Amino acid sequence: MVQMTGKPIDDLLLRDWRPIAQVRAPVTQVLRSAVPSIDVHNHLGKWLCESGEWLIEDVDALLAVMDDCGVQTVVNLDGRWGDELTANLDRYDRAHPGRFVTFAHLDWAAAFAASAPDAVTAALLAQLDDAVTRGARGFKVWKDLGLTHRDATGALVLPDDERLRPVFAAAGERGLPILIHTADPVAFFTPLDAHNERIDELGEHPDWWFGGPGLPSFDRLMRALETLVAGTPGTTFIGAHVGCYAEDLGWVSRMLSTYPNFAVDIGGRIGELGRTPRAFARLVADHPRQVLFGTDAYPVGRQDYRQAFRFLETDDEAFGYAPGCGGAGGEVPPQGRWDISAAALPYLVSPDVLADFYAGNARRLLHLT
């Protein structure tokens, strides 16, 4: 039997395996985006902070990071509703004009408490009007719509629920985009077994697994997303995380070709896109007005932006998609045990397309000056 530092190799546990890649490849530092950029997918509020405090303790420090990295504007997806929305708008948008854009949420639980379908719709329309009056620049729809929220009958409510369509249509009438996160990575819906490529991540976060009974399948959720987009052509939908299906860029490309009101951001999916970088570059080239830059890295720092720029702008190969992980880092990457290669966008798309990807598309869809 092969021995390993005095232990049988058969005793090595997956959680203890920290391989260090022996590949020697160029490492290119990209300190700033090639052109000024807009991060359309980030979190700056209190919603995702367990302590209930602001995710960003020092707004001036964040602005310094943005300035150093060439980021003009960050979209804050944490506005929520009511006084919390106002607090986000006051802290970011109004205190620093042009640097931040805050999206609101809708309080699904409060609306779904109503039993009559018309009452559900009316409650949500009232929430939408209130958010617009307070100054929201768009709406964030999270995966809990489809996976968590139930109506008064106990039924799960999916994004294509007919009671919701007038609400999404009203957002479009007001010129406000919907950034929508439906489902989660495909592996979060597949069996927890030796074939699941994200078993490390799901071991750390077992509540992220949605493959159990009583929940819709990944495919059902994607059908709901498409039905919503198709049925609300006057509303702009930005599909978070590469349209929520970064594992299948063919599906994403079909959606972008079929529905001119659909766009995608790349937030949180460099790990996926780096496995198919040429296909990703084709996606940007084929849909130059519908793919947007975003990070979903929070609290975001210089290394997060520079890792993203390295993936987008260089032709580096075989490196970790998260700083300090994979490649020669030795630490287990947060999403899966693989390395990535860069997309080399400046070599494969025109300067105008690159500028639109980084900022122009966001500026147009969000009606920024």
Image (cartoon, rainbow, N blue to C red):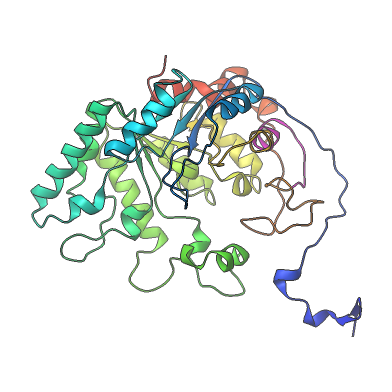
Q: Which quarter of the image is occupied by the C terminus?
A: top left
Q: Position of residue 351 (x, y in %)?
A: 62, 18
Residue 269, position in %: x, y? 57, 46
Q: Residue at x 86, y 51 (%)?
A: 23
Q: Which region shows up in magenta?
A: 307-319
- Tell which of 234 and 12 is nearer to you: 12
Number of marks: 0
Q: Residue at x 44, y 39 (%)?
A: 45
Residue 255 versus residue 38 in the image, above or below? below
Splitting the image into 4 quarters, where does residue 152 fall?
bottom left
**In the visual, does 39 lie left or right of 237?**
right
Residue 236 seen in the current view: no
Residue in the image at 39% along x and 50% along y: 182
Residue located at (70% from left, 39% from top): 342
Instruction: Using the image as rendered, state which of residue 268 and residue 245 is in the foreground.
Output: 268
Q: Is residue 312 magenta?
A: yes
Q: Is residue 211 magenta?
A: no
Image position of 325 (left or right of 136): right
Farthest residue, direction bottom: 1
